[in-house]
Image (cartoon, helix red, strand yellow):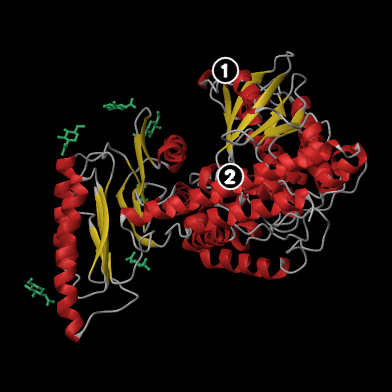
Amino acid sequence: MNFSGFIRCILIFLVSIAMICEADPRISEAGLICGTNRSSPAATIIPIFVKAMEVVSQRVTDHNWGSHGVNSTNISIYGLANCYQDLPHQDCMLCYAASRTRLPRCLPGKSGRIYLDGCFLRYDYYNFFNETTDSANDKVNCSSSIGVATGQELDTLNASAGNLIEQLTGRAVANGGFASMHLNGVYGLAQCWKTVSRKGCRECLDKASRDIKGCFPNRDVRALIAGCYLRYSTQNFLNDPSQSSSSRVSKGVIVAIVLGVTAFMMLALSAAYTARKRSLKRKRERINLGKLSNSYKKSSLNFKYENLEKATNYFDPSTKVGQGGNGSVYKGTLPNGNVIAVKRLFFNTRQWVDEFFNEVNLIHGIEHKNLVKLLGCSIEGPESLLVYEFVTNKSLDQYLFDKNKIKILNWEERFRIIVGTAEGIDFLHRGSEIRIIHRDIKSSNVLLDENLEAKIADFGLARCFAADKTHLSTGIAGTLGYMAPEYLVKGQLTEKADVYSYGVLVLEIVCGRKSIAFADDSGSLIQTVWKLYTTNQVTESVDPLLDGDFPREEASKVLKVGLLCTQASVALRPSMREVVQMLTCEGYQIPEPCQPPFLNSSLLAGGSVKSSIRSLVTNALSKFDESSSYTNTTGSSSMRSASTGPHRSDEFLLKESENRK
Ligand SMILES: *[C@@H]1O[C@H](CO)[C@@H](O)[C@H](O)[C@H]1NC(C)=O
Ligand SMILES: *[C@@H]1O[C@H](CO)[C@@H](O)[C@H](O)[C@H]1NC(C)=O
Ligand SMILES: *[C@@H]1O[C@H](CO)[C@@H](O)[C@H](O)[C@H]1NC(C)=O
Ligand SMILES: *[C@@H]1O[C@H](CO)[C@@H](O)[C@H](O)[C@H]1NC(C)=O
Ligand SMILES: *[C@@H]1O[C@H](CO)[C@@H](O)[C@H](O)[C@H]1NC(C)=O
Ligand SMILES: *[C@@H]1O[C@H](CO)[C@@H](O)[C@H](O)[C@H]1NC(C)=O
């Protein structure tokens, strides 16, 4: 075995240890409670909700819990997320992501709280942070998949559960709001939210204990109270089987020893290797190290963590220029004066070091005038960083939708952006050896340079991040509107999903309106444009800010392309190559969009799509550590999707829209 093979094995070994240590994010749902109804329109609530949740997400990433309130003119939204304390960080992130994705079922209008078995998430229209009990909404979930105790077991359960709950409550209150333990075959966990005082915690757990006793003799019971969560079960649901802190330590010690020994072996081996290396010729060395790591070490792809830290002034908040699905972006200046954008990744991709690396290497080679260039990465420091070229101007959404617009884009500028974006996506789909599906085409991922040339950001690394999960969790209201129906409903991902998102983007650029999933009653953007199209008035939908100053024929051509791209039928959507031709070739025969786009807010408000989102996320989560993914670097063999489903999914979609009527 050569050296790089050996390193690979060690990495795989370390990763599997890490995986064993974080087995279960406990995302099964104990209860979802939708609260008071607000009459404010969804269009005012959703953006504030998303804003509050963004801060909460960041805080959960840092501390495993977080709270934040956002005030707007006539509405405030407060959010609180709290992982139960025994959940390791990685699992906490997964549990939070799951809860974040499920909670919007209460939207639009109602406040909501969701209790999963590993974490809690709530938003409301008032400051509820120190609330301990709430008689209208507190619940117990008595339903027990493991049944009811009978006969002799009944007495033991009654005695031990009663005893356990009493001890748990005492310990949790004394212990900063968390305790877990087991007693005579009954397991229990108590957690008060971090924002609740000691006295409030006692109050809450007392209520939980009273309520939970109403469920005797069920074997698995959870109390879902405003300020806390309490559960007992005859099955062990706790993270650590033996749970006592001493065994936790000993597990830690074992891991530490294993890591220590491994590190020592690696050191020894690398010393031996270095000695040997000197005696070999350069060519030989190249073969031994493998192309990958060799080219990485040598190429400018390799950035030192300290240098990036300095370049961004230690990630000073004032240098932060953006926030994406996978992490925050900072502007930095290298010692040689080059300005860069540094992306700090939420998820610690060092676990995927090998694959991540490979991916960075592949994408690094992709160059196109409409794609943001990836300059390199740093994977050796305490967190993983990606380095991109810095694009001077802001993202397209800030031009289109911000209240205080930087500048109103005129028609020529919009048209160039539309064509440029199409060319960029077309290049991703078929311009290089690897096929890349972007998955997240949206206005905030299109940056504009100083000439207002479109540059697509954030492509390619998707499969390193279990991207489905992050998409869904970080911007559900923002991204949902762009997701192709078959992707949303079935998880089918092909290039045509990008075509759909691109179509939505085109309509947004031309109409100057956001296509949010939970649109207000006037209907979604696609619906509006479609209706105008069928009555031959499509140019009515063009952004009023243009003041009628645009070529009508070209505008209606562009809108038609947008409608073609957003057709429900995967097969009918054009490829990006065809889109580019339609836009740029005079006299190209553009087919009629023949199938009305169907995805609108009323469908989203129904249950079916939401439950599909749920299963999508569950799916994505279950694939969390699976390295195989939808995108494939070698070609079509494992693109799981293309031809299997369009007809079936269309049927499904059509049925859905019929049901609505
Ligand atoms: C109670 O918890 C079980 C287990 O997670 C869950 O399947 C069930 O849906 C919950 N009941 C309610 C009313 O939410
Ligand atoms: C909630 O409020 C909206 C808007 O006022 C209303 O249409 C809806 O029927 C209300 N829902 C309930 C359950 O009260
Ligand atoms: C909130 O304010 C906006 C205007 O600022 C108004 O249109 C809307 O009706 C208000 N909503 C409520 C619930 O008062
Ligand atoms: C929001 O407004 C309330 C009063 O309406 C105030 O108590 C609270 O401090 C404000 N919160 C923020 C974050 O500004
Ligand atoms: C919670 O805080 C509010 C003000 O923010 C205060 O009026 C109330 O008394 C507090 N409740 C408890 C139980 O501490
Ligand atoms: C459980 O024990 C208590 C006394 O500790 C008793 O009052 C109650 O009836 C018992 N419940 C059952 C279901 O046996």
Residue at image location 64% in from the left, 35% down from the top: 380
Q: Quadrant of ligand 1?
A: bottom left
Label 1: how many Cα within 10 Å (few below 14, some 14–19, many 20+): some
131 vs 423, nearest the viewer: 131
* Residue under the image location 58 percent in, 47 percent down: 471
Residue occupied by mark 2: 479
Q: Secondary structure at mark 2?
A: helix
Q: Which residue is mark 1?
A: 313
| In this rendering, position of residue 315 left or right of residue 232 | right
Secondary structure under tag 1 reads loop
Q: Quadrant of residue 286?
A: top right
Of the pair 654 and 156, the residue shown nearer to us: 156
Indicate the position of residue 593 as horizontal and vertical percent values. Answer: 76, 54
Asked whether residue 425 is in view, the answer is no
184 up-or-down from 139: above or below = below
Q: How many marks?
A: 2
Amino acid type, residue under disc 2 in the picture = Thr
**Earlier-in-chain disc, 2 versus 1:** 1
Which disc number belongs to residue 529?
A: none
Q: How dense is the environment of label 2, judged by Cα within 10 Å: few (below 14), some, or many (20 and up)?
A: many
Could you say where residue 345 lies in the image, as x and y percent from the top left?
A: 59, 37
Q: CA distance from mark 2 to mark 1?
A: 31 Å
Instruction: Please state the horizontal and vertical placement of residue 406, each as a whole percent of the image.
Output: 62, 19
The residue type indicated by label 1 comes to: Asn
Q: Nearer the viewer, mark 2 or mark 1?
A: 1
Q: Quadrant of residue 493?
A: bottom right
Q: Residue at x 66, y 67 (%)?
A: 649
Residue 481 image point, x, y percent: 59, 47
